[in-house]
Amino acid sequence: MYRTLYDILHDVSKSSMVDDGDLQAAGLLILTAALHGLQINRVGIWIFTDDKQAIRCRMLIDGDDCVIDGELELMRATYPNYFLALDNERAIVADNAQEHSSTIEFRDGYLIPFGITSMLDAPIRHRGNMLGIICCEHQGPERQWSSEEIAFASALADTYGRAISAAQRNDYERQLQEINDQLEQKINERTEILQHALRNLNHTQAKLIESEKLASLGRLVSGLAHEINTPLGIAVTSASHCANELKRIQHLYHDEQLNEQDFAQFLESIDDGLGLINNNLNRAATLVQNFKLSGAIHTANEEEQFELRDCIALTLKSLQPLLKKSQVNCQLDTGAPIQINSYPGAIAQIITNLITNSIHHAFNNTPEKKIHIQLHETPQQVAIHYTDNGCGIAEDIRAKIFEPFFTTARRTGGSGLGLSIVYNLITHKLGGDISINEDQSQGAAFTLNIPKTAPLHQQ
Ligand SMILES: Nc1ncnc2c1ncn2[C@@H]1O[C@H](COP(=O)(O)OP(=O)(O)O)[C@@H](O)[C@H]1O
Ligand SMILES: [Mg+2]
């Protein structure tokens, strides 16, 4: 069945093979079309080397043979005129190839042995550059290439250019996919590393927070120990005084020298001594009791009904030795009792941390060091206003002081956890909030808002 060149071209052009990206399949389709359309037996695709000094055969069909990526290569140095013609980037139309100025160089070595009489080379272009040619070779009696045939060969070469684009696109897509895969793998690896680091960090942070909590508890306990030491010391001295008196009176009695006056003195002295012991042991017991009430050594997890002012006063009492040593005068305003249902342990810890911060950070250049704590009650909440008359908190660090590990005192052993613990206790445990007052010109000033009823926590 005779098919016009136009029909063949139309079939090739609309074949999906051209744009599939499989260059070999597209090449085979195009060369087969050339064979049929031009009624020839030999046709090939030749592509320049990168330096354009040679042209290499990518695909050659000769009768029933098809060679792909064979060894055939033509050098510019050997065929200068042919390459000059190629440099024009136009089709080479050689009706009489064995005489044509562009192809005569092939006569003895190629055209005659293969019986080739006419040649038609159509340039393959891609993105405006000529990459090579489709070379149509006619054997048998010499023929004249018609303008339709020349246009047909050129159109096939253009179609091959289209196939190259598709192959390149495929290649890019594959590369992109590979890069994507690698990237994804890298991201996964990095994420794994980061997650590991984060787990470690969380673990370390939890440990540090725990040790800072223990440290602040330690400060309270050492305060308590100091307070208890005084009455216990008095009780011990008094007990040994009583023992001495008893010994003295026993001697007098055995020596039969005990008179009424000695005995009366002894009774008085024992009475005083026992009174002192009694008072001071009671004082110590009350201190322990109060300390327990202040929540400072509570298992810290129990919510209970208590009076806020007392709780703070007792915390201050246990911090008294520390305040005294640092010559800080700490005042809690007087006022009506405020009953709340919350966590006394957390409140003791918050107050302790704020006070230790004032002692450590505020009073470098303050002659009369003062801390003032005021309470304001509203129906649902209590506001605790905490101020000291130290240097205040500089504006540029205000946004950071509640962050864990932020400290301006790293060199002197600051952990940067104190205020972060305060923040967490207030916001999470007590369900309140804490803010730094705008005006820090008179010293540091914090406002703590605490609901009278703390949120319920699962133990
Ligand atoms: N009363 C204060 N006066 C001045 N600066 C303070 C005061 N309280 C806290 N700061 C600042 O806030 C920072 C963070 O406090 P904190 O979290 O308790 O850590 P640390 O006490 O270990 O430094 C301190 O390093 C200090 O710069
Ligand atoms: Mg601190």
Image (cartoon, grey):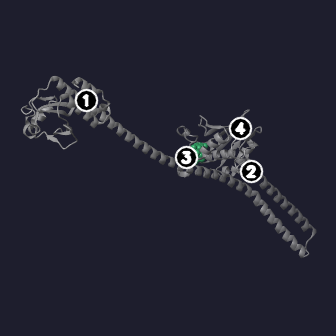
Q: Are marks 3 and 4 in contact (CB under 8 Å)?
A: no
x, y (%) of residue 160?
A: 25, 32
Q: Which residue is mark 3?
A: 405
Residue 314: x %, y % from top left: 73, 47
Horizontal and vertical percent position of residue 134: 19, 33
Ligand 1, image quadrant it occupies: top right
Residue under the point 24% across and 26% down: 8
- What residue is shown with label 4? 375
Q: Earlier in the sequence, mark 4 or mark 1?
A: 1
SS for dot 2: helix
For label 3, the SS is: loop
Identify which amino acid the numbered label 3 is placed on: Phe
Residue assigned mark 1 = 159
Task: Assign the N terminus to one quadrant of the image.
Answer: top left
Q: Amino acid at mark 2?
A: Lys
Q: Earlier in the sequence, mark 2 or mark 4?
A: 2
Looking at the image, tell me whether mark 3 or mark 4 is earlier in sequence order: 4
Dot 1 surroundings within 10 Å: few (below 14), some, or many (20 or more)? many
Position of 91 compared to 425: left or right?
left
Q: Which residue is mark 2?
A: 292
Q: Nearer the viewer, residue 193 or 403?
A: 193
Helix, strand or loop for disc 1: helix
Q: What distance separates the C-alpha of mark 1 from that of mark 3?
A: 68 Å
- Work out how far the residue at label 3 is from the one at label 2, CA to CA, in angstroms: 30 Å
Q: Earlier in the sequence, mark 1 or mark 2?
A: 1
